[in-house]
Image (cartoon, grey):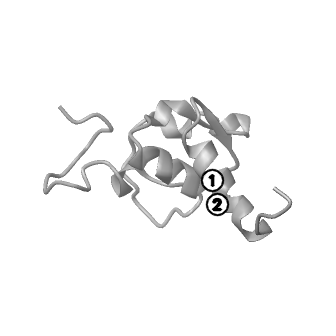
Amino acid sequence: LDDMDPNLFGMIDTVIASRGRLFVGTWFSTFTGYINRMRGYNGMPGTTSYYSTPDRKCNTHEWVEPSKILTAREWPTAWVGIDGDVAVHSETTN
């Protein structure tokens, strides 16, 4: 690692965290948000991501349509159904 550009460490951490069995991140963190978005792109369900604060711990476990500007987290509508032309209303598409 001594020869690696330290500017790459954050990107490497993101890729590793996005492929973990579980992920715990921080509310209002763009780093956490991007990891959750990558997890969604990779087909990981929201039930495998958590937030570190007890009152928001399981916020990714239920499908909720964003109804106002909420940038504190990523929303499944950003990755579920992006390859098709259907309106998706749940994390699982049947």
Q: Is residue 28 visible in the rendered structure shown here?
A: no
Residue at 70%, 49% (x, y): give it. Answer: 26
Helix, strand or loop under label 1: helix
Report the side of 43 relative to 32 (left or right): left
* C-beta proximity under 8 Å, tags 2 and 1: yes
Residue at 57%, 29% (x, y): give it. Answer: 21
Q: Residue furthest front?
A: 3
Residue at 70%, 65% (x, y): give it. Answer: 8
Quadrant in which residue 55 is drawn: top right
**Number of labelled discs?**
2
> Label 1 amino acid?
Thr
Q: Which residue is mark 2?
A: 11
Task: Report x, y in % for residue 87.
Answer: 18, 52
Instruction: Pick whichever, 24 or 70, lies toward us.
Output: 24
Q: Which residue is mark 1?
A: 14
Report the side of 37 relative to 63 (left or right): right
Instruction: Pick whichever, 29 or 16, lies toward us.
Output: 16
Q: Residue furthest right?
A: 2
Q: Is residue 52 visible in the rendered structure shown here?
A: yes
Question: Is 43 drawn above or below residue 22 in the view shown?
Answer: below
Residue at 33%, 38% (x, y): give it. Answer: 91
Task: Report x, y in % for residue 94.
Answer: 17, 31
Task: Report x, y in % for residue 61.
Answer: 48, 33
Dot 2 surroundings within 10 Å: few (below 14), some, or many (20 or more)? few
